[in-house]
Image (spheres, helix red, strand yellow):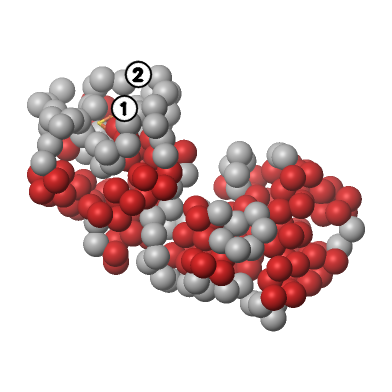
Amino acid sequence: MPTRPAIEEEFTTKKKRAQRILRTLRKLYPKAECALTYRDPFQLLIATILSAQSTDVTINKVTPILFKKYKTPKALADAPAQDVEKVIHATGFFRQKTKSIQGTARDIATNHGGEVPNTMEELVELRGVARKTANVVLGTGFGLNEGVVVDTHIGRLATRLGLTWSSKNDKDAVKIERDLMELYPRKEWTYLGHAIIFHGRAVCSARNPACTSCSIATNCPTAGSFEAD
Ligand code: SF4
């Protein structure tokens, strides 16, 4: 195992290391992108809400059926909840998710003329939408770098890679996002989230990170020191 960078480091040192990590990610995953299938920001928003505690593969099987049945926010909002629950059952937590997606669809139909808003302030006002989901919609659906998506996978890797001042036990998504935004230029924020997810899936899994074959190991302060999260 190569020498690891120190966990404690100056901001400028960390920033340079962060850039090296990004360069490697760009080489490894030049086409890293959102794995959810969607046709427009509304479909992406609903798919992202459904993806909590589920897999992209499952969501990509369910959403074509959902959007064929309910083509507009109003159609989804007005549908009987039991019918929606049946369609999204496989995504897990289907009752709560039905409330969330119908609430969001209702807000969009009623307050935004049926169009998904494209600002953070308006998105987080929608029922069932928190900052993480809003970042997915803004970055991937609208091409706007307003923040960095931080889910459990990105939080795990950011902590292992020492790209946050948040501790392992802290896992504060807002703090991790703020740290990543400080380390990386705005234009990289959306790509960074996708690339980190790709690396988590390919190499740095939760239970079994493959440090010995990881191309980022020389820039990772926790390389080879895995402890289960
Ligand atoms: S696989 Fe190991 S070396 Fe690579 S990023 Fe994860 S913890 Fe660091």
Who is closer to the viewer here, 206 or 16?
16
The residue sitting at 29% across, 66% down in the picture is 187
Residue 75 makes an appearance in the image: yes
In this view, the mark in front (1 or 2): 2
Disc 2 secondary structure class: loop
Query: Which residue is rendered at x = 52% and y = 60% of the image?
Result: 134
Q: Is residue 218 left or right of residue 212?
A: left
Q: Which mark is residue 210?
A: 1
Q: Residues within 10 Å of mark 1 (few under 14, many from 20)?
A: some
- Ligand 1 image-quadrant field: top left
Residue 147 appears at what percent x and percent y? 39, 60
* Residue 132 x, y percent position in the rendering: 50, 53
**Of the residues shown, which amino acid type is indicated by label 1?**
Ala
> Which of the 4 quarters of the picture holds residue 78?
bottom right
| Left or right side of 82 for 229 | left
Q: Residue at x 72, y 48 (%)?
A: 97
Q: Position of residue 146 (x, y in %)?
A: 39, 65
Q: Earlier in the sequence, mark 1 or mark 2?
A: 1
Q: Which residue was labeled with disc 2? A: 227
Q: CA distance from mark 1 to mark 2?
A: 13 Å
| Residue that appears at 12% across and 36% down | 9
Q: Quadrant of the C terminus?
A: top left
User: Is disc 2 surrounded by few (<14), some (14 to 19) or many (20+) residues within 10 Å?
Assistant: few
Observer-nearest of 70 and 128 = 128
The secondary structure type at the circle numbered 1 is loop
Relative height, residue 79 to residue 109 (above, below): above
Under 8 Å from ligand 1: the CB of mark 1? yes
Q: Is residue 144 above or below residue 207?
A: below
Q: Position of residue 1 (x, y in %)?
A: 15, 23
- Is residue 24 visible to us here? no
Q: Is residue 125 above or below residue 56?
A: below
